[in-house]
Amino acid sequence: MHTGSPPVRTPLAVLALVAAVAALLLGGAGAASAHSGLTGSDPADGSVLASAPPYVTLTFTETVGLSEDSVRVLSPDNERVNPRPAQHADGKGNTGRVQLADGLAQGTYTVAWRVVSADGHPISGAFTFSVGKPSETAAEVPDTAAGDTAAGRLHGVFRHVAYSGLALLVGAAAFVLVCLPRAGALRPVRRLLAAGWAALAVSTAALLLLRGPYETGGPLTAAFDPAVLGRTVTGKAGGALVVRLLLLGAAAVLLRRAARRAADPDGRAEEWSPGRRVRWAAAGLAAGLALTWAAAEHAAAGIQVPLAVPASVLHLLAMGVWLGGLVTLAAVLGSRGAGGPAVPASAVGRFSALAFAAVAVLAVTGLYQSWRQVGSWEALTTTSFGRTLLVKTAAVILMLWAASFSRRLAGRVLAAVGTGGTTGADAGAERVREPALAGAGKAAAGPAHGTGAAAAGGEAAGGEDGTPAPDGADGQRRRLRRTVAAEAALGVLVLTVTTLLTGTQPGRAAVKSAEAAAARGPQVRVVTVPFDTGTAGHRGTVQITLSPGRVGENSVEAVVFTEDGGLAAVPEIRLNLTQTELDIGPVDAKLTDRKGYWAAYDLRLPVPGEWTAAVTVRTGDIDQATVRAAVPVTGRPK
């Protein structure tokens, strides 16, 4: 006979979840990788122009968001020379254009840019171009990643907390509404619901405040700037966060009403079953919460967006039902006491079926999202997203493997209970009161199928009347406890890796960015050729710099060095380029003396391929030499 209430032990799954969140809070979050990429610019990086351009235009792999400081053009003296903020060029969402001031002086200008990808993550970079001739520049550009700021790191932490809160809230609510309505009156379950709601609400509010400085790279104090917050709430990501807060307000009202109906004034559970309206309202709120992620992150960018968004919603909901339900089941089974309510084995069976369906949805939507975001088998091993996805896949496989052990062990325990005097009919009606998962010594019977979480409910050792289980059940119980703990820990790992994936550039976009960079090719071609006029002291090297080294207008500079490496002034340098395969040329570069070097800034090359540069260096009245070198020329970037 039960004579006391032993201390309640915290369920292992809850401990694992708390430990993971604590590690995230203390360890911080890495900077988000770039989710878009710069495919080209006009002027091109490193180009030298004869006159100042009226605009600077940038082109990206996908649609980007622009702010007042998205594109800054800085003079050699580090003064801003674009008086107006960037706009999309010709209405194209994947471009950014700024108008330059009139009368720009000669020298090298720096273009610093920072935009927001379609999936809500900021990216940044910089490049230079010159007007007339290159010069030294004092422009300062941050050399850190776009998300590697104080606001960016905090933003990453609260994203993790938000995912954990969603899993707890959705999983606990699903368990109460589908598996065991009376569990809503249990203090541990009510705490889980409150903790999930609070974690999601607090993290969402923090993300809304941090969104402005996260996108612009500003200081943390900008989070409380009304102007910055105003721009945030009108953007796609900020609008999604506002909607999430509104949905959480409606969820709080629904949770409060349901809690009042599920418990009497004394706080004891009563027979209460949520109606169809309550279930549909809860399902709608859960789907709406998941949609606030899907509509503002990876699913909202790239290919097949109309299909990717609902797939992402289902993936998030299935994740919450499975992982959050696992924690809730452990909490229910660990709720003990002299007056504690019994848990029907049928409730464990219902969760088993629910969890199985969630795993099936996760598998289908996960495969689709993997194909959509990775794009190729090669990207699985060559991109950060692909490698992280492989880690998640391995964790899911290990979790299912642990669940299979739990299922088999639960079957053995139930078989042992059956031999101890419990008939098949009695076992179906038996109630779980103190399972071994929470350290209890009494019996708990449940169906031996479904996920490992459900199998935890079947960790029985004897009947409700205190009949001891056979000796063989004790060893099985201990092994089952270990497999359930391993399953819970792996579930938390899956949740953590999932949040990391949302901060990593999808493999398909990474490959596209790399291909665009390869198409652009080197921004400057440098060729150094030795020459010898046959006269003592009249030998050295000539360095030819071609920028950007592709079809179209190029600048070319020639510098002569003496044999010992010093600069040499020569009376004449001529440069002709020929495309032998296509029988084009020679094209005279028409170099002019620039007092120390020779240059031309309007050399036009019509076709890509390998050109032959013939350089004639005259060092005296009659002393000259002609040398040749191959110069590769690339096509225009797409």
Image (spheres, helix red, strand yellow):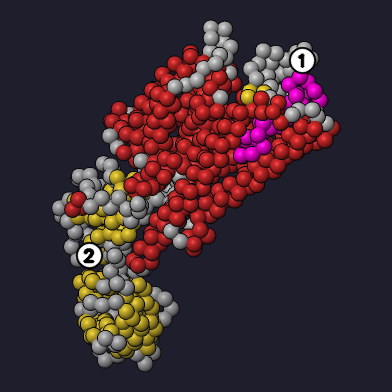
Task: Residue at 55% x, 19% y: name it.
Answer: 182
Instruction: Work out how far the residue at label 2 is from the one at label 1, CA to CA, in angstroms.
Output: 90 Å
Q: Quadrant of the C terminus?
A: bottom left
Residue 557: x and y in percent read 29, 73
Residue 596: x and y in percent read 28, 72
Task: Residue at 43% x, 58% y: name it.
Answer: 375
Residue 69: x and y in percent read 28, 43
* Tag of residue 49: 2
- Indicate whether 377 appears above or below 495: below
Residue furthest to the right in view is 471
The magenta stretch spans which residues?
441-468
**Magenta-drawn stretch contains 447:** yes
- Indicate whether 227 appears above or below 34: above
Residue furthest to the left in view is 102
- Indicate whether 126 appears above or below 10: below
Task: Residue at 28% x, 56% y: name it.
Answer: 59
Task: Please name the amino acid that badge 1 sits on.
Answer: His
- Image side of residue 316 versus residue 597, left or right: right
Residue with the mark numbered 1: 2
Tag 1's secondary structure? loop
- Image side of residue 555 versus residue 279, left or right: left
Q: Main secondary structure of the magenta part?
A: loop
Between 570 and 286, the one nearer to me in the picture: 286
Between 322 and 568, the one nearer to me in the picture: 322
Q: Can residue 206 be spotted in the picture?
A: no
Between 65 and 167, the one nearer to me in the picture: 167
**Magenta-drawn stretch contains 458:** yes
